[in-house]
Amino acid sequence: MERKIIQKLIEWKNSANRMPLVLQGARQTGKTFIVNYFGGKQYQDTVYCNFEKETKLVSIFNNLSPNDIITNLATLKRRRIYPEKTLIVFDEIQACPEALTSLKYFCEEAPEYHIIALGSLLGVSVNRGISSFPVGKVQFLDMYPMDFEEYLWAKGETSLVEKIRKCFAGNLPMEDALHEYALKLYREYLFVGGMPAAVQNYISTNNPNIAAVVNSDILSAYQNDMGKYNKQSEIPKTKLVYANISTQLAKENKKFQYKSLKPGSRASEFENAIEWVCLAGIASRVYRLEQIMLPLKAYRSDSDFKFYMNDTGLCCQSQDILFNDVVYSNTLLNNFLGGLTENYVFTQLRANGFEPYYWTSSSQAEVDFIIRINGDVIPVEVKSTIHTESKSLNVYISKYSSKYAIRISAKNFGFKNGIKSVPLYATFCISEQ
């Protein structure tokens, strides 16, 4: 399945200032597959090392000399390793802190060797003091689940993607039949999600229950991971926090409520647990902006945030949502569907490089996301249906004289009264440029 990150990997390979690459991302997002696929297409050979499975490899990093490491690695792997022509992959590198340290010396002394390091829990490991990054000596790249555009590619809907991008660029309404078809595919994606294994199984079987089983297995793997690089006393809290994210999406007020975890709970009690799920890449916080001033990060409220899971398919599975409930918009699901739609928009914006915030006013008006496009601060309102009436966006526009606003909903493309209408299926078109 085609992934956008391949182009970024090619750019890294061809960069004149190339450093060892650290590819970060949650478990099951496809990091190992895509790096080995990239190696097979772009290099004469790929030498793959997994430090969790091949523990014997750890000993060769007692000596951090790049030349010695290459010699010993070639001997153990029974392969020749050529500068520029061989891709070296260090998977689950958090299991060998010395290998992570060696990246510094490869950058300084042997930049001719192309190295990509992976690690599902690398962020947790480093921030918990288990490992340390060679700061300034590596390049970072984040990998996420498949976005909706990649999902459409996987289904062979390339012509539909082209049509969506054309209508987005020109604010041109799409033909009704195509618009409804794209919305159907979007609702399908909400349930299946973007985990490559779930997508592949759904496409090959056309059975959403298979995708649900795959996503259930991924959730179980995440739960098992919560015992790694975590204090024993924090494990139950971490599991409780993660399980509660999708539950709170069903509430009208999407701000994360500690009291929903257990009566009387406070932020300090769950701070480490929340940090763990964020560092693992399986959930993310979106902070409230206290005012619209630059730089946005300086005006965020660290105590007020909304919490989103890294994938809508996992979100549905965590609540035992049924495929037909999502695809046919069961009215009993309306409250949850609103939060799920926000979660979807967040994942698409994040995949495109945005760091979104949200905004509220003293009169309880709320704009779902605030992003920057071409340097402009743009408000983004999200609606799960065609009903788009909302005072909040108008309050924001009148208060801050925004250049324009974006409303993401089930309505067709258009531009009216300074508001760009973007159908839910076209969220992937919103980019920083």
Image: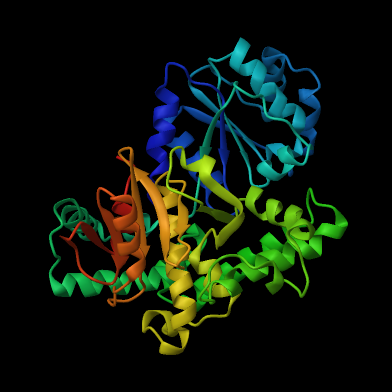
Total count of labels:
0
Depth check, front residue: 75 or 425: 425
Q: Left or right: 10 with respect to 166?
A: right
Quarter of the image for residue 383 reads bottom left
Residue appearing at x 21%, y 53% in the figure: 165
In the drawing, does residue 154 fall left or right of residue 38? left
Answer left or right for 35 relative to 96: left
Residue furthest to the top = 109
Can see residue 136?
yes
Confirm whether residue 155 shows in the render. Answer: no
Most foreground residue, 98 or 326? 326
Which is more toward the observer, 245 or 369?
A: 369
The image shows residue 291 at horizontal and vertical percentages of 46, 49
Quarter of the figure with the C terminus: top left
Q: Dividing the picture into quarters, in which one does residue 128 lie?
A: top right
In this view, 13 is above or below 196: above
Say if 38 sits above or below 85 in the image.
Answer: below
* Residue at 38% from the left image edge and 83% from the top image edge: 329
x and y, in percent, of residue 411 in the image: 24, 71
Color scheme of the displayed model: rainbow
| Placement of 134 over or under 430, stated as above or below | above
Q: Position of residue 345 (x, y in %)?
A: 41, 60
Write the residue at 20% across / 55% down. Answer: 168
Q: Residue at x 73, y 68 (%)?
A: 240
Q: Is residue 114 left or right of residue 345?
A: right
Residue 77 drawn above or below residue 359 = above
- Rendering coords of residue 427 (x, y %): 33, 58
